[in-house]
C-alpha cells in the first residue's frame, strides 16, 4: 500500500449530543458568537449560540410541563431553519427522540409515522403542512399538542403558535430548570436520539433508531479522516434535516467543530445564496454537482470559440496538475506557470460564482459520476465522496481531503469495519483500514457489510425487519454491492437494483447511467433490462441544450404526453448514445430508448429526497411504455 498510517482516534468524551453542543457554545466559542444565519425579508440575519441556548431552555421547560419524559417521541415536519436546531437540542438535552418527517410526504404517510412512532407532539413549519396534518388529525390520537410556526392560527389547548410556546416556556423555566439539568446528566451514548424513517419505496417505512453514540462516533470518525473541517468554516445548508445525511454532515459535525451554518432560502435559490453567504463547505448530492458541471460547460461553450478553447486548455492543465499532485510530484516551472494562468483566466471566475471561498463539497446520497468529481478537481475544488445509509448514521467510508480517488467512496472509517460478502458463496473478506487490505481483495465483489459504533440499534417496533439486516455475527447488511480499489471502497450498485438479462448477464444500472450522463445532452437516464434480452432506457434530454438547438417553444414542454415521439429529438440524441455505448460490453449497450419530456422529480413521486430515481415506482408508472420497447 502507500504507507498511510491510521489517524489518531480522537474522543472528547461527550456522552450526549447536547454536551457536544455546549462545548461548541462555551469552549470553542462563547455564547455570543454567531452560530446560525438565515435570510429574513431579504436580509441575512445572524443568531448566536445564546439564542439557541435560551430557546432550548424554553422548549425543554414546556416539554416537562406537558408531562413528557425521557424516551418520549416528538415529531418535526418543517424546512431547515434555526428553530429546527433549537427544538432538536431541547430533545437531545432531555433524552427525548426527534422524529423528523419529510415535508414532501403525503398526509397518510405522515400519519403512519406519527402513529408508528407514538409521537406525543408535532411541530409544523407552515400553513400547507398544518393543513396536511389536520386532514389526518382524527387518526393520530397520540399527538397531544401541535406547535405551529404560522402565527395567524386560532389557538387552543391543542394548537399553539411557536412564539406563544416560547413565551410560556420562558415563564416555566425557573420551575423546571433544575429538573432539566438532572435529566441532561442522565443522558448517555446508548440513548436513542432520533427515529429516521426509510423512504418505504419497497415496503412499509421503517424507523431506524439512531443513538447519541451513533452520531458522536460518526463525528469523531469524520474529523479523524478529514481534519481540515474546523471552527472557521461556514456551511450552506439546503438538504433536508429530516434526512440523516444533512443532520450528521452539517448539523452535528458542524457543532462538533464549531462551524457556522447558513440556511439556503430554497433549493431553487442555492446558486444565489452561495454568492451571497460565501460558504466554505456544503453537503450536497451528486445531481447538484452534475447540474453545476453541465451549466459551467454550457456557459463556456456559448462564450465563443476562443474562450471555449481557453476553457478546455485550462481543464487539461488542471488535470495534469492534479495527476502530478496525486503522485506526490511537484508541478515543475512550466506546468506551474500554466496553472497560474489558468487559475486567473478560468478557475477563479468559476470559483467566484460559488462565493469565492468554497474549499469542499461533500457528496453523498448516491453515486457521483467520476468525470464530475474529476472536473471539479481540475478546477481546484475538492469533492469528497462518501458512503453510508440511514441505518449507519450515516457514513461508513469517505475520501480524505488530501487524496481523492474518484470512482470510489473512500477509506473505511477508523472505528468501523467493512466486509465484502460473495452473493452466492457467502464467503467474506474484512477490511478495517489500509493495514488489513491485501492486493487480492480488489478482485472480490459482493454485498457490503458493516460493523461499528455508528450502526443503528434496529428498527423501531419492528424486530422482523431488524433481523433481516443483521446476521448472526452482528454484521449489518447494507444491500449495496461493491469491491475495494487500492484500499478504497468502490460501489457497484444496490443489490436490489441489479438487473439480470434473460441471457444471464448481470447489469449494474448505476454504472451504465453514469456512463451515459457524461453527455451534456442527457439530463437523466433510467436503465431497464431485468429479465429482458437487451438493455433499454428512459432518457430525459437536457432542456437547456435541446430547446435552443431544435428551436422548441416553451409550450413543447407543457404537453400532457409525458413522452416525446418526434424524430428530430431522437436524431439529436442518437449520436450521443451511440458514442457513449462504444466503451461498454455489447450486452450493456442501450438498444432501445424512449424520451421523457420533463425530468423525474420528488414532487411527482419519481425520486427520493436525495434525488435518486425510485426504480420500482418508475417501472410501475411507465410499465406500458416500457413494454412497448420489447415488442
Image (cartoon, rainbow, N blue to C red):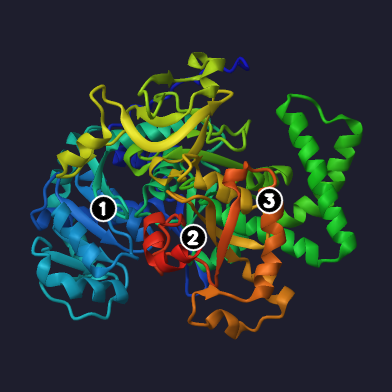
Residue at the image position 9 percent from the left and 60 percent from the top: 142
- The earlier-in-sequence mark between 3 and 1 is 1
Q: Which numbered disc, 3 or 2, marks the residue that appears first in the sequence?
A: 3
Relative to 593, residue 3 above or below: above
Q: Secondary structure at mark 2?
A: loop
The circle on residue 630 is 2
Tell me which corner region of the image, top left, top right, bottom left or bottom right, holds residue 586: top right
Q: Secondary structure at mark 1?
A: loop
Q: Which residue is mark 1?
A: 203
Residue 22: x and y in percent read: 34, 41
- Front-lying residue, 343 or 285: 285
Does 224 sit left or right of 289 as displayed? left
Position above or below: 252 against 270: above
The tag on residue 580 is: 3
Mark nearest the camera among 3 and 1 is: 3
Q: Residue 545's image quarter?
A: bottom right
Amino acid at each position: 500500500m502507500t504507507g498511510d498510517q491510521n489517524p489518531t482516534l480522537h474522543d472528547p468524551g461527550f456522552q450526549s449530543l447536547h454536551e457536544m453542543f455546549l462545548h461548541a457554545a462555551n469552549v470553542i466559542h462563547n455564547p455570543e458568537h454567531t452560530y446560525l444565519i438565515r435570510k429574513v425579508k431579504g436580509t441575512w440575519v445572524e443568531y448566536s449560540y445564546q439564542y439557541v441556548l435560551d430557546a432550548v431552555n424554553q422548549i425543554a421547560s414546556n416539554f416537562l410541563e406537558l408531562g413528557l419524559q425521557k424516551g418520549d417521541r416528538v415529531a418535526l415536519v418543517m424546512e431547515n431553519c434555526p428553530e429546527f436546531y433549537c427544538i432538536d437540542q431541547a430533545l437531545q438535552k432531555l433524552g427525548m427522540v426527534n422524529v423528523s418527517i419529510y415535508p414532501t410526504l403525503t398526509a397518510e404517510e405522515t400519519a403512519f409515522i406519527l402513529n408508528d412512532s407514538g409521537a406525543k407532539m408535532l411541530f409544523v413549519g407552515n400553513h400547507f403542512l398544518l393543513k396536511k396534518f389536520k386532514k389526518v388529525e382524527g387518526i393520530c390520537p397520540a399527538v397531544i399538542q401541535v406547535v405551529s410556526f404560522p402565527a395567524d392560527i386560532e389557538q387552543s389547548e391543542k394548537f399553539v403558535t411557536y412564539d406563544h410556546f416560547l413565551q410560556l416556556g420562558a415563564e416555566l423555566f425557573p420551575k423546571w430548570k433544575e429538573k432539566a439539568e438532572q435529566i441532561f446528566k442522565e443522558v448517555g451514548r446508548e440513548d436513542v436520539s432520533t427515529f429516521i424513517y426509510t423512504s418505504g419505496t419497497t415496503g412499509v417505512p421503517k424507523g431506524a433508531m439512531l443513538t447519541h453514540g451513533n452520531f458522536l462516533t460518526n463525528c469523531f470518525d469524520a474529523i479523524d479522516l478529514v481534519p481540515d473541517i474546523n471552527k472557521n468554516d461556514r456551511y450552506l445548508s439546503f438538504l433536508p434535516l429530516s434526512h440523516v445525511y444533512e443532520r450528521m454532515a452539517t448539523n452535528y459535525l458542524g457543532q462538533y467543530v464549531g462551524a457556522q451554518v447558513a440556511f439556503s432560502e430554497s433549493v431553487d435559490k442555492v446558486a444565489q445564496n452561495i454568492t451571497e453567504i460565501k460558504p466554505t463547505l456544503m453537503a450536497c448530492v451528486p445531481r447538484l454537482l452534475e447540474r453545476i458541471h453541465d451549466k459551467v460547460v454550457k456557459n463556456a461553450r456559448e462564450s465563443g470559440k476562443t474562450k471555449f478553447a481557453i476553457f478546455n486548455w485550462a481543464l487539461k492543465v488542471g488535470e495534469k496538475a492534479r495527476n502530478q499532485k496525486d503522485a506526490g510530484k511537484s508541478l515543475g516551472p512550466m506546468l506551474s506557470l500554466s496553472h497560474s494562468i489558468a487559475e486567473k483566466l478560468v478557475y477563479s471566475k468559476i470559483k467566484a460564482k460559488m462565493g469565492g471561498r468554497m474549499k469542499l463539497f461533500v457528496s453523498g446520497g448516491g453515486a457521483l459520476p467520476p468525470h464530475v468529481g474529476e472536473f471539479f478537481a481540475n478546477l481546484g475544488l475538492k469533492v469528497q465522496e462518501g458512503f453510508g445509509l440511514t441505518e449507519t448514521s450515516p457514513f461508513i467510508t469517505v475520501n480524505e481531503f488530501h487524496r481523492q480517488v474518484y470512482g470510489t467512496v473512500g477509506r473505511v472509517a477508523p472505528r468501523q469495519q467493512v466486509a465484502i460478502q460473495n452473493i452466492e458463496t457467502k464467503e467474506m473478506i474484512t477490511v478495517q483500514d489500509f493495514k488489513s487490505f491485501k492486493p487480492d481483495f480488489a478482485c472480490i465483489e459482493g454485498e457490503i457489510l458493516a460493523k461499528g459504533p455508528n450502526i443503528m440499534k434496529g428498527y423501531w417496533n419492528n424486530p422482523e425487519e431488524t433481523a433481516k439486516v443483521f446476521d448472526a455475527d452482528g454484521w449489518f447488511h447494507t444491500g449495496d454491492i461493491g469491491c475495494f480499489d487500492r484500499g478504497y471502497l468502490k460501489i457497484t450498485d444496490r443489490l436490489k437494483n441489479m438487473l439480470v438479462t434473460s441471457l444471464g448477464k448481470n447489469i449494474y444500472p448505476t454504472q451504465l447511467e453514469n456512463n451515459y450522463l457524461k453527455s451534456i445532452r442527457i439530463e437523466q437516464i433510467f436503465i431497464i433490462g431485468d429479465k429482458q434480452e437487451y438493455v433499454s432506457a428512459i432518457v430525459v434530454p437536457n432542456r437547456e441544450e435541446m430547446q435552443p438547438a431544435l428551436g422548441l417553444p416553451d409550450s413543447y414542454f407543457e404537453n400532457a404526453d409525458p413522452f416525446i415521439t418526434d424524430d428530430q429529438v431522437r436524431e439529436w440524441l442518437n449520436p450521443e448514445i451511440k458514442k457513449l455505448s462504444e466503451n461498454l460490453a455489447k450486452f450493456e449497450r442501450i438498444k432501445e430508448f424512449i424520451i421523457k419530456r420533463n425530468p423525474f422529480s420528488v414532487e411527482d413521486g419519481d425520486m427520493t429526497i436525495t434525488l435518486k430515481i425510485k426504480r420500482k415506482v418508475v417501472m410501475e408508472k411507465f410499465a406500458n411504455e416500457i413494454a412497448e420497447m420489447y415488442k
